[in-house]
Image: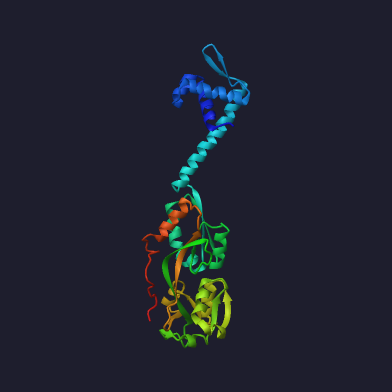
Amino acid sequence: MLTLQQLQVFRTVARHLHFTRAAEALNLTQPAVTFHIRSLERQMRLQLFEVQGHKVILTEAGEFLLQRAEEVLNAVDATERSMREFAELQEGWLNLGATLTIGNYVLPPVVTRFSSSYPRIRLSMEIANTAEMEKALLARQLDLAVVEWKITSPEIEVIPFQTDELLVAVPVGHPLAAQKEVEIERLAQEPLVLREKGSGTRALALETFGPLVERLKIALELNGTEAIKRSVQAGLGVTIISHTIIKEEVKRGEIAALRVAGRHMERDFALAYLRGRALSPAALSFMAMILGNSPEFSVTEPTAIVEF
């Protein structure tokens, strides 16, 4: 079988047209170079060089092989350069997934910083609910996912990095709007606007109601947080939603927010990836950026963003 070493020796001799100088360039002995060339000629069943006096001349077969050797060795060199660049984050890609809350409201600053730090890394991001993120990881469609609810598959590693608090959002002017807390029994009487099935926010909201879940009045199911906020503002119902999503509307007085009495509706934002999968340097760097001591992703207790 033809080897890269044979091609490298052959190309060097062909360039120098001198066995001794080729040996010096390759840091080999002249007999070793001669051995490689003779082995190559036997393997090819072709004469690659002619010796006329003190001159070494390429045969027609040698000229043909030199062209092919240059193509192969240049491709090898290019591959080595690309792999060095890949390892040094000068080249590569990152297929990232995120749930809706994180993808739309939490990740943009870190994605911007990552792209600025590594402009030659091609980054794509898919945004869907937790169930879809889990499926995509298992199908190896994503390198990493950043999720906001429980991953059930034992094949997926999960690393929590930040706690998120959910609040009850009601329209301004609603009877509950002036309160700091609401009893769960009272909240169960309100028409609810919820995320779609498979959403982590929906799962935590329904879990909060416990046995009262059978009595709930679900007015709307929507798969977008902006649509949910607009529905609440329009008075179509109340919702349970991440404080991250509604903090600006609360500040502007467009939505009122309160807590459920005696309950802490918290969940973890977490990194998720397939166990046993070798993560690329780009994926590892993105993980480090999230898990590091950055302002966007410091691991802290939940802090209230609403003045009660």
Q: How is the image coloured?
A: rainbow
Looking at this view, is 73 or 307 the one in front?
73
Asked if 196 appears above or below 219 in the picture, the reply is: above
Residue 129 in view: no
Q: How many marks?
A: 0
Quadrant position of the N terminus in the picture: top right
Residue furthest to the right in view is 45
> Camera-side residue: 139 or 201?
139
- In the image, residue 12 above or below residue 229: above
Q: x, y percentage for residue 108?
A: 46, 62
Is any part of residue 164 visible from this angle?
Answer: yes
* Residue depicted at 63% across the width and 23% down the height: 45
Q: Position of residue 281 (x, y in %)?
A: 46, 51
Location of the C terminus by quadrant is bottom left
Q: Is residue 43 left or right of residue 272?
A: right
Q: In this rendering, is residue 124 above or below 217?
A: above
Q: As drawn, which residue projects farthest toward the top?
A: 53
Q: Quadrant of residue 251?
A: bottom left
- The location of residue 240, given as percent across then percent down, is 49, 78
Of residue 21 and residue 257, the one placed in the foreground of this image is 21
The x, y position of residue 169, in whole percent, is 47, 79
Which quarter of the picture shows residue 247? Answer: bottom left
